[in-house]
Amino acid sequence: MKNDLAEPRRARRLCVFLSCVSALAAQESRAETLQSALAAAYANNPDLEEQRVIVRIRDEDVSKAAAGHRPKAHASFSAGPQKSSVRQPGGRDQLRNRLYTNDENFGHPRSGTLNLSLTVFDGWRSDNSMRQAESGVLAARATLLAAEQEVLLRAATVYMDVLRDTAALGLRKHNRAVLMEQLRVARDRAEMGMATIADVAQAEAALAQAESDHAAARESLRASIVEYREVIGRAPDHLEPAKGYERDLPATAEHAVERAVALHPQVISSLHQVDAATMAVKVAEGALMPSLSLGGQVFQQYDSYLGYPGTRQFSAQVTGTLNVPLYDGGAEYSAVRQAKQQLAQAQAHVSAQRSAVRAKLAVSYSRLATAKAALHYGATVVRASERALEQIRNEAEFGQRTFLDVLNAQQALFDARVKMVSAQHDRVVASCAVLAGIGGLSAEGLNLDVEHYDPAKSFEQVRELWIGLDLPAAR
């Protein structure tokens, strides 16, 4: 009996030995770290690239607003055949009847017009429009940083998902092997009359459940690998264990909340939206103010007088136009009131964002504390379960324990180990979530080894660009 019950322990030692050999072989090849995975996600994630393009779209708003200060020029040309027929009195005949002459002419008149205009004053609408556009750009940049944090948090999550599911699959594979050996022992003992049919049935049921759990763990790992490819842009290859970023977190939760409400990208974005809404009110009020513009026109025309060749007409003028709005049905007043309501909405959005940041940060801290407690007490559970399983096996050798007791102890140890794996996963992910909650989960904040995207480069290229169709460099 003693040798039979020792078989599961030998099988467990063999699985541990094979796992160590596999780990050593994996170390010989280049391993993937959490830092390198986050860098790959930063460089390759399509969602993040889409947000960068959105920022570059907002950059063009500043260039369009700056057009209000720039001169405008328009040219028009016309040319084409012209026929003219003139019937006019030509005197009287001998009978005093009035005579008429018909004069027909054919020509090709040509003309060109050049118009120049410059807005001197427009109620500061152009200035305020530029400030509004610049605030919109800053808001878009903050939104980009928030999207960057979301992508990096998702990348850290899928990285830990693959690690967790790989470890869980290994544990379930080992558990299946142990239960297969226990089933073999139960059948051998039943043939010798040392075990009952119930013992064999219990071992078969435990093995069937282990087979089902193993298949589920295998499919869960496959799904995590698919998501890893989607987020990070390449397949996982020898992932190294990760420790998370608890060292980068504030000392207390109160300090974290203070930092979050002041520096979180979503809060920063909402503050810039308030600035943009404030400028929008001033732009709307500018429509009620007078405007002054200067204009010039040069006109040249050839062969235009009744088709006679050689005729020419030239004119040039400079004009100043003062436009004073009096009343236009009340549309301008409605636009001002609407802009003020939108400003109130933007101000309320700041408070909503700060509340959301506080709540999300509190949840992340709670999950981090839960994971740390699970790791701390889970290690004790694993050690105690290992001792309990060893003792129950020894007692079963002398008939003091049933075969079901051994199976239950084995399952308790397996569950404790799986919970430890999940707790380590949750601890790393929660630390990343807390870091994201205070605005620190970024490529710059994590010092990722990757070329950092600088949105200011594109902005500076298009801000003072008067003409051109080529897109600025993305980086």
Image (tube, rainbow, N blue to C red):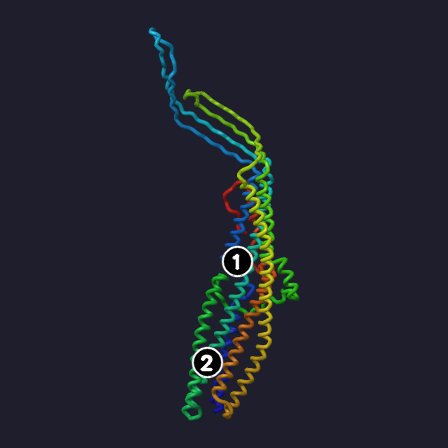
Residue 231 % position (x, y)? 50, 62
Question: Image point 47% across, 64% down: which residue?
Answer: 227
Query: In front: 349, or 67?
Result: 349
Q: Quick check: 67 above or below 410?
A: above
Question: Image point 44% across, 70% down: which residue?
Answer: 219
Q: Which residue is mark 2?
A: 177
- Return the residue found at the far left: 95
Residue 3 left/right relative to 256: left
Query: In front: 28, or 348?
Result: 348
Q: Amino acid at mark 2?
A: Ala
- Total labels: the figure holds 2
Kindly state the secondary structure of the residue where label 1 is placed: helix
Q: Is residue 180 visible?
A: yes
Q: Quadrant of residue 429?
A: bottom right
Query: In front: 221, or 123?
Result: 123
Residue 357 % position (x, y)? 59, 61
Residue 51 % position (x, y)? 52, 54
Q: Amino acid at mark 1?
A: Ala
Question: Image point 63% across, 58% down: which residue?
Answer: 262
Kindly state the secondary structure of the residue where label 2 is placed: helix
Residue 43 is tagged as 1
Q: Is residue 460 visible?
A: no
Residue 41 left/right relative to 104: right
- Callout 1 touching callout 2 (CB < 8 Å): no
- Return the residue found at the far front: 329
| First in residue order: circle 1 vs circle 2 | 1
Q: Quadrant of residue 336?
A: top right
